[in-house]
Image: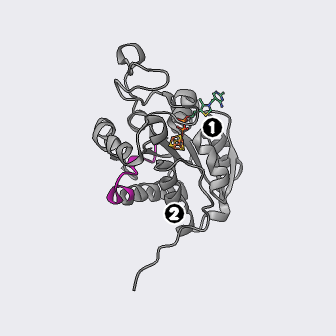
Amino acid sequence: MAIEKKAPELMNYSLFCGGCGHGVLLRLICECLEEYGLDKKTIAAIGVGCSCHLKSGISIDLIQSPHGRAAAVATGIRRAEPDKFVFTYQGDGDAYNIGIAETLNAAYRNENICVFTVNNGNFGMTGGQMSWTTMPGQKTATSPSGRNCDLTGIPIKVPELIAYSFTPAYVARGAVTTPAEINKLKGYIKNAFEAQLNNEGYSMVEIMCSCPTNWNLPPIAARQRLIDEVIPYYGLGEIKKRGV
Ligand SMILES: Cc1ncc(C[n+]2csc(CCOP(=O)(O)OP(=O)(O)O)c2C)c(N)n1
Ligand code: SF4
């Protein structure tokens, strides 16, 4: 008999482009919310960017934060409502380029929130501009000749910055590339959830995704570029384990 795996009831329709990693990540978060029985006591602080699509994509309470400020908004919610489960959901342009102060300050204070950041190497929603995470030589709307790292710096690894500079409860980087990596990523998301549920403090998971639309690649080729060119630079795995 075939085993039927149902989509989480929290998920609505998707506005993400075909092949976008956001949708897979969102499904994993919804699965975890349902498995932990958190759907009725969660408030998410979403960013500005393709994360805005959570407004129609997921049936939980959420607040759209000013650009870059989701970690500060989540801090306020969690401190005012300590019984709520609170997570942020942002893109790399939002959480890093634009909101690095809020992102780092929340980590520095070890706020008891979960932070999910989609790293797709560009500002996706606005047409694929270069971000801090764009790869060396990568052509984007604002680096048409390829990213020149001598002029713009090298792709940043914010999870490592946080894990090695502060005292967060948990930091990991996963990817939505293969079933094996997606299963590992779900384990990282669960660890982040459990860190907050056990009052251990700040947890962050960066999720490596492709953005087929702005990479000008079909979904399968975009996924392959992520595997071959991007993930070897960033690396995957747990950067700060819980309780260590
Ligand atoms: C203060 C402000 N500056 C710029 C913008 C334009 N803007 C909207 S979405 C976005 C890009 C977000 O990119 P990212 O955070 O990487 O998320 P993605 O769309 O790639 O998931 C930008 C620059 C804005 N809405 N508000
Ligand atoms: S623009 Fe990129 S990040 Fe945004 S939904 Fe489309 S593929 Fe995903």
Q: Nearer the viewer, residue 199 or 102?
A: 102
Where does label 2 land, which residue? 32
Query: In the structure shown, which secondary structural element does the residue marked by tag 1 occupy?
Result: loop
The residue that appears at 63% across and 61% down in the rendered structure is 12
Q: Quadrant of residue 49?
A: top right
Where does label 1 land, which residue? 48
Q: Are marks 2 and 1 in contact (CB under 8 Å)?
A: no
Q: Quadrant of residue 179?
A: bottom left
Density class for disc 2 (Cα within 10 Å; few <14, some 14-19, many ≥20) is: some
Say which amino acid is labelled 1: Val
**Ligand 1: quadrant of the figure:** top right
Say which amino acid is labelled 2: Cys
User: From where the camera sits, is residue 104 visible?
Assistant: no
Q: Nearer the viewer, residue 48 or 224?
A: 224
Does the beta carbon at disc 1 come under 8 Å from ligand 1?
A: yes
The residue that appears at 67% across and 47% down in the rendered structure is 79
The residue that appears at 52% across and 64% down in the rendered structure is 31
Which stretch is magenta? 168-182
Q: Is residue 214 magenta?
A: no
